[in-house]
Amino acid sequence: MKLMKAILTIKLSSVLIALLGMGFAITGFSSPKKTVSPQLMTDSLITVPLGGNAWRTDQDTISGSISNNGVVNWGNPQASFTAYIRVGRTGKFKLYLNLTVPGGKSKIAVSALGISKQVVVTGSALTDHYVGEWQVTDTGYVAFKIKGISKTGSVYANISSLKLSGAAIDSKTTYVKNNEGEFFYWGRRGPSVHLGYVVPDGVNAEWFYNEVTVPTGNDVLHSYFMADGFNEGYFGMQVNSATERHILFSVWSPFKTDDPKAIPADQKILMLKKGDNVHTGEFGSEGSGGQSYLNYNWQAGNTYKFIIRAKPNRQGRTEYTAYFYAPELNKWLLIASFSRPKTDTYLKHLHSFLENFEPEQGTIIRKVLFNNQWICTTDGKWIELNKARFTADNTGAKGYRMDYAGGLSGGNFYLQNCGFFSHYTPRNIYFERPLAAKQPQVDLSKLP
């Protein structure tokens, strides 16, 4: 009799395991987090929070948005959302939506890699719902478009995350993993990318000259195309709104703070002079210091020239002066001159960068070209700089976003970021453009 009971117990256990394998829920048995399918519980499982990896696709903002908690209050049938994940290997993956349906029942469609699948979801508790399986044939970014098909309640769903598992998912799968700032700020902005120019040893660079071209169509809102960067500041051009563009020049205070009001009087940046129609003041949030900008409607496709000067006064301060050449006006313009305390140096750590400073614009690709970099030394000697190191910020270095690139393009250095393009440039490598031998045609003694 005991033997028969043991055999019966084994057979019943086998049936239960088989039923669970087909996705049936058995009363009296619990599964982790009420998972709809046990296929989810695999070693390759990743959880992709929508708060840092998804954007609302349509322009209407009524009923449905992205927050730290993911997609919330989604009741508008016109609203759709797109999440981006980069896969580093080919193979299959299974996709689950982790969500709640506050009331009623909804049907949701998820499209990826040219294939759309639908799932019926219900339940007020946060639950994983199996959507389907996809095949990845190439590495790179995969866009997941989420759209509502029907609902019986007021809201389609509140979606916390996507969960993926399978052969295509491994340690090389890229997405924004953590909220390292309010509303996944840095991950949504996308990676900033830089070029660090190689300067010969033993020279004092008093002047740094650079030429910048934003290719047509790449003047994306909220982009900063920074031309002349140095240890203590930066100088370049921005797209601030649909109607406003800046030529921006800033110098950091030696006092480390994000609040300009906290800077002691003896460590404030002093404005010595400024050009016509140039606005000056202070800035904060990412360090603090003196800032100046000129409203100037620069145009994509045109080439602009930037030159910065550093001159120590040998009394513990260094003066930084920035000039911008406007081809539309055919002349050099003074932007501003700032005096920095506790500083006695010429120009060091010369660099350029490209950044997006608006998180909602992190889905749009942009590119910039830099060419004809020169320094002029304290003894008046011009030296061309034609070698640069490509780097990215922490968003790229941590592998949260890999839509970054840089290198050579048509004899220029270039930088490119955002938009979830699949190719990327390995960080910390050097590029060398051909020497152009086009010394800047500028009389430094006659600059305004």
Image (cartoon, rainbow, N blue to C red):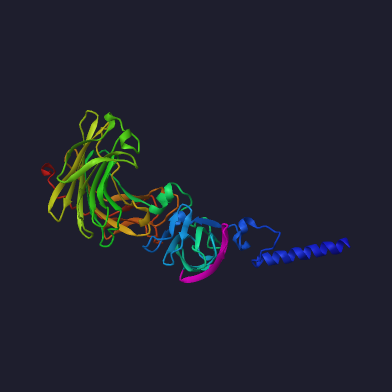
Q: Quadrant of the N terminus?
A: bottom right
Does the magenta segment cover residue 132? yes
Q: Is residue 440 visible?
A: yes
- Residue found at the far left of this picture: 446
* Nearest to the observer: residue 388 or residue 155: 155
Image coordinates of residue 13 in percent, x first then y, are 75, 63
Above or below for 315 versus 353: above
Image coordinates of residue 298 in percent, x first then y, are 20, 55
| Residue at the image point whose x is 27% and y is 30% from the top | 265
* Nearest to the observer: residue 98 or residue 5: 98
| Most frequent secondary structure within the magenta stretch | strand
- Residue found at the far right of this picture: 1
* Nearest to the observer: residue 447 or residue 62: 62
Mark count: 0
Q: Is residue 351 left or right of residue 105?
A: left
| Residue at the image point whose x is 30% and y is 42% from the top | 349
Image coordinates of residue 447 in percent, x first then y, are 13, 44
Q: Is residue 103 left or right of residue 228?
A: right
Q: Is residue 437 left or right of residue 146?
A: left
Please report the bounds of the magenta region as a residue range. Answer: 113-133
Does the magenta segment cover residue 312? no
Above or below for 183 versus 91: above
Q: Is residue 410 left or right of residue 141?
A: left
* Nearest to the observer: residue 30 or residue 174: 30
Image coordinates of residue 278 in percent, x first then y, are 18, 45
Q: Quadrant of the C terminus?
A: top left
| Residue at the image point whose x is 45% and y is 61% from the top | 83
Q: Is residue 439 visible?
A: no
